[in-house]
């Protein structure tokens, strides 16, 4: 059985996002993190459309 992948969409200025990443690190949880505010606008718009 494979381990599910945790995917985070975060902002570089978000205190709660940083706290969550620190907590996941402390429990050795593997995750993928994407800084949404650093993404190109077109890519970010596509992501938001896919999530809607």
Image (cartoon, helix red, strand yellow):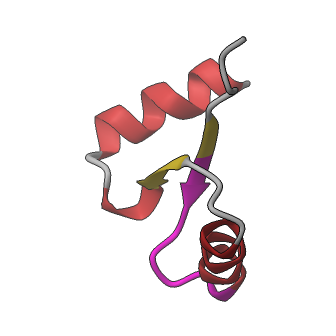
| Residue at 42% in and 40% down | 44
The relative height of residue 48 versus residue 50 in the rendered view (above or below) is below
Q: Quadrant of the N terminus?
A: top right
Query: Is 14 covered by the magenta stretch?
Result: yes
Q: Quadrant of the C terminus?
A: top right
Which of the pair 30/36 is nearer the observer? 30
In the image, is residue 26 part of the stretch drawn in magenta? no
Q: Position of residue 43 (x, y in %)?
A: 34, 34
Horizontal and vertical percent for residue 20? Answer: 71, 73
Residue located 52% across and 69% down the image: 11
Give the tally of numbered discs.
Answer: 0
Q: Which residues are magenta?
A: 8-15
The relative height of residue 18 versus residue 10 in the rendered view (above or below) is below
Furthest residue toward front: 1
State the image coordinates of residue 48 (x, y, percent, origin top left).
58, 33
Q: Position of 23 compared to 21: left or right?
A: right
Residue 27's quadrant in the figure? bottom right
């Amino acid at each position: 059985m494979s381990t599910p992948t945790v995917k985070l969409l975060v902002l570089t200025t978000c205190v709660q996002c940083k706290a969550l990443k620190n907590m996941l690190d402390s429990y050795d949880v593997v995750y993928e993190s994407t800084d949404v505010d650093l993404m190109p606008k077109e890519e970010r718009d596509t992501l938001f459309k896919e999530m809607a």
